Image (tube, rainbow, N blue to C red):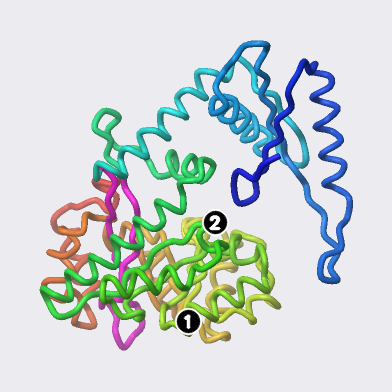
Amino acid sequence: MARVGADSFAVARSGLISVADAAEFAEQVLADCAKPLEIAGRELSVAARIGIADSNSSLPSGQRLLSQADFALERARSSGGANYQFFAASMEETAKARQELIDDLQAGLRNGDLFIVCQPKVSIHPASDGQLSGAEVLLRWRHAVRGWVRPDEFIPVAESAGLITQLGDFVLYSACWQIRAWLNTYGWSPRLAVNLSARQFSAPGLKERIEQVLRETEVSPSQLEVEVTETAAMHDVEKTAATLQALRALGVKVSIDDFGTGYSSLNYLRLFQVDAIKIDKSFVDDIETDANAKALCSAMLRIGQALGFRVVAEGVETTAQLEFLRRGKCDEVQGYLIAKPMPCAEFEKEWVAGRRGVSGSALDDTLASRALRGDAATTGQV
């Protein structure tokens, strides 16, 4: 047996083992995992998933067998519940393509094919309407042969292949070095927000890692914001509360991302020391057409305000959505209506060099100017 990931384990069995024997063994493991365990006075159980690969009397490499088993495991996860899946020959091409993507991703990190872009966040608070309040940092990959590779294609692969922490470190360092560059050039920089994967957030020494990056780049903690998904935050509430407290004690801003889409509990939310909650795009999308989405958005705005959190709405694409959020006293917005995610050089030119958004009507002026030019809010998106 071996531990091969944060929550992944491998069992290797030698000798002639029939498919029926392997299935019986997998069923026994699932049954054992499902038995309740008492840890620190709490009763816990595990719904395991298992992927199985078979050498079929040939002599494949250990890495290939692990890759096949991992691919079967992905199928088991997508099936839901506790179950097991065998790797099938029909999966071979898909598995090969996945491994090639992993290899290319590792090469892309070495060769500089991955880079960050920034999407501005602006205030819609009456006292600072239209002013730049910060930016979210997003990762992009332009492959020499494949062209643009979408994040929703390579991020899940990076997670399952154990590369997500490496990608996360790359984004964190890139964001802080960019802040340092703007401070050196202009004497100021907007606060940049980076997304932490669930694996990054749960890894030991997160505070020390961020502290090291800030120290090396000579960036103040207040210039950095970390975004943690609601699902990741609710995974282990006690650990989450301690981690968030440590990050805020360091001086880093913290926000709960994708608010409303996870397994939130208002009782737990009050325990979290955070600066902001971000209303997920899926709710903002439908506030013009769905009364339930509108009601939920209003409720989330009131929850954030009652708890003293800054409330940010993401995915704002229409003026009607913007006006609804203004009336609801949302603090900040981001989305294609404001600006698309853009390379750092373009963001610098448009938002940093001239300290974009210094008048109360700056946002409305920007939108009016865009309408006169005929610019589409979604033009040029990656």
Could you tell me which residue is drawn at 86 percent across and 27 percent down? 24
Q: In this view, does 99 lie above or below 366?
A: above
How would you classify the magenta stretch by its main secondary structure?
Answer: strand
Give the percent coordinates (x, y) of residue 203: 55, 62
Image quadrant where residue 268 sits: bottom right
Identity of the amino acid at label 1?
Arg
Q: Answer with the quarter of the image where residue 168 lies.
A: bottom left
Element type at mark 2: helix
User: The magenta stretch spans which residues?
Assistant: 113-140
Is residue 328 something that shows in the picture?
Answer: no
How far is mark 1 from mark 2, CA to CA?
Answer: 19 Å
- Which is nearer the eye, 147 or 103? 103
Question: Which mark is drawn over residue 248?
Answer: 1
For label 1, the crowd category at 10 Å Cα-Cα, with few meaning under 14, some 14 to 19 and many 20 or more, is some
Q: Is residue 194 left or right of residue 294?
A: left
Q: Is residue 99 left or right of 25 when viewed as pictured?
A: left
Residue drawn at (52%, 83%) of the image: 305
